[in-house]
Amino acid sequence: MASCSRLSLHPFLSSASVRLACNRNVQVEASTAKSLYPPIVPSRTAKSKAAKRRVVTEFFEQLRSCTAQEKIRALTRVQRKKYVIYPHTFALNADRWYQHYTKTTFLNGLPEKYESASVVDESVLSEVRAVVCNSILQEHWHAKKGRTFIQKEQEQLVTPFLRNAVCGLKNLLAKESRVLTLSSLDFDPQVNYYWLRGERTIPEGHRRGRVEPMRFQIDDKPHSQIRIPQQLPEFVPLEAEISAEVPVITLAPDLLPLFRRQYDNHIFIGAKLEDPCCYGHTQFHVVPDRFRRDKMSKRGLSDQVEVSLRANGIASLFAWTGAQAMYQGFWSEEDVSRPFVSQAVITDGQFFSFFCYQLNTLALSPSADGNNSRKNVCWGTESMQLYERITDGDIVGLNDAVLKLLLQFLLNKPQC
Amino acid sequence: MSFLFYLFRYPLYQLGNPQLRIFRPTFNLALVRPGKEQPPDTVQFRIPMEMTKFDVRNYLEKIYSVPVAAVRTRIQYLKRPDYKVAYVQLVSVILFSQISFLRRIRSSVEEMQEKFMEDECQRQKPDPRRGGVTEWFGL
């Protein structure tokens, strides 16, 4: 039988005692201690909004490490009904609606680069004049074409003129601008782009009441395009403040009218991904027969002529620059780190309009648009007459300003 | 005397004759308030089934001299009677909130309730043709 001895109070009084030492170091070590359990995340397969969000986040994370080809395939693989935007449209005031769907501001006139009167070489200008005059006279004077009425007049008259003019100008200016020798000129290419913008509540069907993003597709067939291996220089810096606003349309796209179809979602710049000329330079468009000036004025829509030209420029250039950016691996979650620039000339044979487009953001989908303050910019001119009329093998009233702008557009080159 | 009506005929019309008769169209257009939100330059009409887009355009331009930019039509079936709806896009923008005659269509809920109460009270009153005699002993 051991005798119990009284315990001394000494261990409790000293601050270096074992008990107090244990208490003192616990808080310090807890912050650096490794947790024994994995992080708590929502399930991947449960029927819940958190699970859906996790699946989507993981999908996006996995996409960030893929190549551009795989990204495009993953984002366009699933087919659903989408609104098809036609660059040439009979809809009234379509340019405001298109600006909203592409998040573009429209500025009248051209960027400062073209506004400031630059010195243009007179000899080159006269050569350009010769090429253009020859092309016009070839179609309207030398070649005999039915004078009473031609079905598909634009196709018979304007398309070959523009073909000759573009080919001739590109070869002529190759000695001025080295990038044109390395460029690729294509006739009748296809330009397609597919993107998500805005949300809508499904009105009818088994998914009624749910919110889904609106899908859009542009399928464009320009007359010709010039593609170059390097990027054109930007007109304004990427994060520049632009005074004009993007118009906001709260109505459904069906009221424009825009119609929905389901087919393959294409993203194409005019050549496949592996093509070395993957950046756009200039596109040329021909106004179709239905939207010619005389036909529009017969229907009483003379003021819609400029509107439809603007809508054409915005839609076509947005599709082209967007597709170029997708080819470089950017998409709505990975926004562009440098602006993509392209130019376009839209003509109906006599009137020319010039458009410049700078793509600053691709993040238009509902998830990415929340805190995106960038907007795309489009500059455009009114339509300018190239010539007044053609009489007896001679062109009357040739406008040199149009030729100068054409020359400056084609001579735009990337900084070496 | 009535047989004389059948003897009178208008003279046969040839080009250049004075116009003695006016033929009014048998169409009637009804301007309606859209059920779904429409753009500000779009006006909605209920038109007879036999009318086409060109008829609507000519009707508005020639009779009411309203410049029309575009007309789109659809037929509303499953609602008896079926009717045709025309969405007319005008050249200039119309703001419906500023047109006063359409304000009467927008009746407030209180007015409808008051009217209902009035109708009910009027139904409860005895027949005035009895001259104050009670209905207890009547038929």
Image: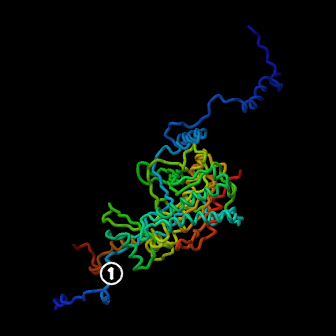
Please, what is the three-letter code of the amino acid marked with disc 1?
A: Arg
How far from the left and from the top, in percent, is residue A21? 79, 26
Residue A367 makes an appearance in the image: yes
- Work out whether A18 lies above or below B108: above
Kindly indicate the quadrant of the structure image that contains residue B119: bottom left
Left or right placement of residue A204 versus residue B136 in this view: right
Question: What residue lies at 54% left-to-right and 68% top-to-bottom?
Answer: A350
Q: Mark 1 points at which residue?
A: B24
Badge 1: chain ID: B
Quadrant in which the N terminus of chain A is drawn = top right
Which secondary structure, mark 1?
A: loop
Q: Specify the quadrant of the image occupied by residue B17.
A: bottom left
With respect to residue A403, does A412 lie above or below? above
* x and y percentages locating residue A223 in the rendered image: 52, 57
Answer left or right for A234 relative to A202: right
Q: Nearer the viewer, residue B82 or A114?
A: A114
Given residues B32 and A246, the one toward you in this image is A246
The answer to whether residue A399 is left or right of residue B96 is right
Q: Residue visible at 48% across and 55% down?
A: A84
Q: Can residue B38 be seen in this view?
A: no
